[in-house]
Image (cartoon, grey):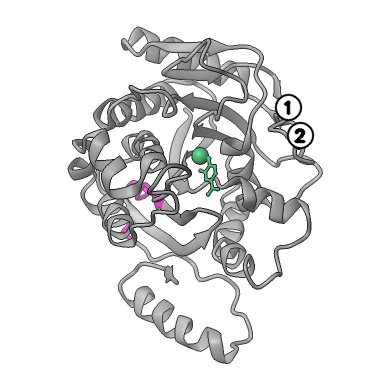
């Protein structure tokens, strides 16, 4: 049987992809962002999922205002990186998992979710930037990816409740797939950001931290949050965070938070990232394995103290 073992939420800022592609990750502006993903890269390299179900939104790259699917699942063999105006990103094509994707499409549609089946689609920064953050710059992505695009661009996006329930339906679908596959689900976008208009540049760290806390401990609280509250508190594009609830719905009610990272700013956005694991059946709750220790610099000593305190609380966090 296939299983969803963990969920990852992360921002999907296009400039982060450009920084990586242009070799700027060590620059003072970008270094703290990439440092925040070091643990995660090691974590996912150790977990070795067979398939990632990657929930993201298309930013008018594959779809336009002519066709606006609320939920669209990529069932193709391959997906090429989209040209978003500067040529496609120099990243590998994404290899899909058509059998599992079709199975999820069938199961969720019969469970009354209106899923659009997509057999040809280019994938934009919403999908490729999270892959880069978690897997770096390989010749080929080390995992098969099922793209799941959600409309959060044109009103009305799906409600948080619908997203959460879709997550549950995806889990049911995965668990009824006969092959033994380890599946990790990504929810991308956010956190607070507003790209245009008088409130451009808006960041609301208090809202973001509360959202991260609720993702782990009290998802029901955010499931009921109306779109207007996302937009008022976290900016017009902050509504991307409803997609995180698809990931959360696919996990157990009680999860282990193995990692959290938050930093401001990157481009126009507050970077938020969290890794949640389903507790292994029959095993006691265990803290995450620590990443390989780095030589401490004066600047990193304060962070080390925070990390140690977090480890004592059985949670590994970095907050900048
Ligand atoms: C930015 C963030 C996004 O999530 C996005 O889709 C586009 C731009 C930004 O911060 O610039
Ligand atoms: Fe976005």
- Any magenta on residue 279? yes
CA distance separating discs 1 and 2? 8 Å
Residue 12 placement (x, y as % from top left) = 54, 45
Whether residue 271 is situated above or below residue 56 in the rendered picture: below
User: As drawn, is 140 to the left or to the right of 66?
Assistant: right
**x, y percent for residue 196:** 46, 42
Q: Earlier in the sequence, mark 1 or mark 2?
A: 1
Q: Position of residue 86 (x, y in %)?
A: 76, 37
Residue at figure coordinates x 70%, y 42% from the top left: 142
**Residue extent of the magenta highlight:** 276-285
Q: How many marks?
A: 2
Residue 309 inside the magenta-drawn segment: no
Kindly indicate whether the residue at mark 2 contacts the one at mark 1 (C-beta within 8 angstroms): yes
Q: Secondary structure at mark 2?
A: loop
Residue 21 or 184: which is nearer the viewer? 21
Which residue position holds label 2? 88
Residue at 27% of width from left, 44% of height from top?
232
Image depth: mark 1 or mark 2 in front: 2
Q: Nearer the viewer, residue 111 or 199?
A: 199
Kindly identify which residue carries mark 1. 80
- In the image, is residue 51 above or below residue 6? above
**Residue 254 in sight here:** yes
Q: Is mark 2 within 8 Å of ligand 1?
A: no
| Quarter the C terminus occupies | bottom left
């Amino acid at each position: 049987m296939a299983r969803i073992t963990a969920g990852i939420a992360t921002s999907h800022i296009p400039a982060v992809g450009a920084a990586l592609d242009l070799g700027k990750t060590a620059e003072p502006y970008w270094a703290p962002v990439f440092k925040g993903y070091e643990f995660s890269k090691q974590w996912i390299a150790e977990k070795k999922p067979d398939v990632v179900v990657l929930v993201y939104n298309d930013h008018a790259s594959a779809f336009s205002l002519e066709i606006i699917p609320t939920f669209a699942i990529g069932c193709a063999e391959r997906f090429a990186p989209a040209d978003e105006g500067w040529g496609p990103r120099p990243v590998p094509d994404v290899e899909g998992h058509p059998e599992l994707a079709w199975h999820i499409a069938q199961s969720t549609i019969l469970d009354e979710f209106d899923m659009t089946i997509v057999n040809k689609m280019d994938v934009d920064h919403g999908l490729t930037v999270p892959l880069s953050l978690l897997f770096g710059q390989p010749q080929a992505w080390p995992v098969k990816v099922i793209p799941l695009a959600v409309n959060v661009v044109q009103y009305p996006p799906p409600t948080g409740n619908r997203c959460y329930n879709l997550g549950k339906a995806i889990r049911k679908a995965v668990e009824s797939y006969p092959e033994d596959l380890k599946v990790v689900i990504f929810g991308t976008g956010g956190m607070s950001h507003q790209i245009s208009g008088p409130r451009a540049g808006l960041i609301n760290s208090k809202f973001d931290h509360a959202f991260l806390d609720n993702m782990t401990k009290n998802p029901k609280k955010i499931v009921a949050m109306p779109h207007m509250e996302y937009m008022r508190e976290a900016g017009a594009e902050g509504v991307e965070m409803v997609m995180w609830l698809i990931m959360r719905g696919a996990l157990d009610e009680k999860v282990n938070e193995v990692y959290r990272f938050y930093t401001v700013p990157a481009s126009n956005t507050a970077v938020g990232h969290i890794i949640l694991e389903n507790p292994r059946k029959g095993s006691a709750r265990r803290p995450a394995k620590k990443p390989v220790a780095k030589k401490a610099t004066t600047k990193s000593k304060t962070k080390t103290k925070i990390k140690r305190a977090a480890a004592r609380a059985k949670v590994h966090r970095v907050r900048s």
